[in-house]
Image (cartoon, rainbow, N blue to C red):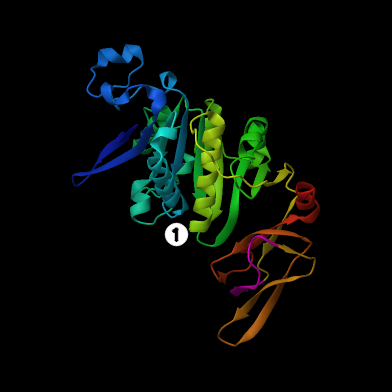
Amino acid sequence: MVDEIIKITGAELPVNEKLIIQKHRIAGVAGMNLNKLKGRNKASEKKGVSAQSGVLAPWKSGKRICIVTGIHGDELEGQYVAYELARRIEENPDALNGIVDIYPAMNPFGIDSVTRGIPAFDLDMNRIFPGNMQGDMNEYLASEIVKDMKGADLCLDIHASNIFLTEVPQIRINELHRDTLVPIAENANVDFIWVHGASTVLESTFAYSMNSVGVPTLVVEMGVGMRITKEYGDQMVDGIFKLMSDLGIWEAPVSEVRRPVISYDINGMDVYYLNAPVSGVFIKDKDHGELVSEGEHIGRIVNPLTGKLLSNIVAPAAGWLFTIREYPMVEEGSLMGRILKQEVYDKCRK
């Protein structure tokens, strides 16, 4: 097994600083005598050897899966997934039969500063793909990232929710790619698969760009911003091993995965949104993942100055509460939760 850190791309910054994006590559027995490939010269590339990494290029060394996280610097759930996935692989290296590329920090300065976008540029990194080799620094970096992942057999783009909401582990899919991605997502060990209408998906996202160049890419949302939910991370890693097993990358027993709820919410009719009717402090009384009845109490908005109850928040209909507000301060109109219709939930549980 080869285990190495590889620089993907980078840029020189003012005051002698450097921006470097790296990946952790773990390559297994399908690479065939990978350690002997160290130090080969560029002439070896004609035989399928990567001079940069010293391992067989993906198209010559079996299947490759890419695990991506850290596009948004305030979404940290994927940091634990990156660590735990590598740790488990290294406990049983003989079971690895392909390449696992782990990209834990696509927006390294954002992670360092706990900033959602790219610091100093006020730019959402997930709105600049597929990038442009001739563009500005950020567009160039995005294009290099896409270039590095081309040819992979599967990619997971792991996000957390923002700091305001917490989510059950879920995969969100553009309806344009549903036929390819839903069967894969069903084995990812998530609780929910949410297929969106094409009009709700931005073409400048990383996942859309990767799917457009032929790399099946799943977008994972789970947990809450600026936190790590270990339970969800372990659940996701179990799902990744199942997907690796399906691809033939992992040849050891894997955990049984849960059967997800699937919503083909093409017209936006399967989900009820709970929005704050007044400003105040939201006190939740239900946890996400619970089933609720129509009219059932979910939480309260209160005024801490006067000690008065401003509003009781109740379920507009029966269903599955898969999103709930974590950050208590709300303004009128703030999103406080999402409920999947009971009939959609029940259909998936029959």
The residue under the point 64% across, 50% down is: 191
| In magenta stretch: residue 286 | yes
Magenta stretch contains residue 291: no
Q: Residue furthest left?
A: 16
Front position in the image: 48 or 22: 48
Question: Percent position (x, y) of residue 189?
Answer: 60, 46
Query: Where does the image place residue 169, in percent across and percent down from the top left?
Result: 58, 51
Q: Residue at x 62, y 63 (%)?
A: 324
**Which residue bears the numbered disc 1?**
226
Stretch of the chain drawn in magenta? 278-290
Establish if 73 lies above or below 33: below
**Closer to the camera, 257 or 225?**
257
Give the x, y percent position of residue 199.
66, 39
Residue at the (69%, 76%) spot, across then down: 311
- In the picture, the quarter occupied by the N terminus is top left
The residue under the point 38% across, 22% down is: 57
Compared to residue 32, the image places residue 94 above or below, namely below
- Specify the amino acid type for callout 1: Met
SS state under label 1: loop
The answer to which quarter of the image holds residue 112 is bottom left
At which x and y percent is residue 33?
32, 22
Image height check: is 98 above or below 119? above
Q: Is residue 132 at all visible to an observer of this figure?
A: no
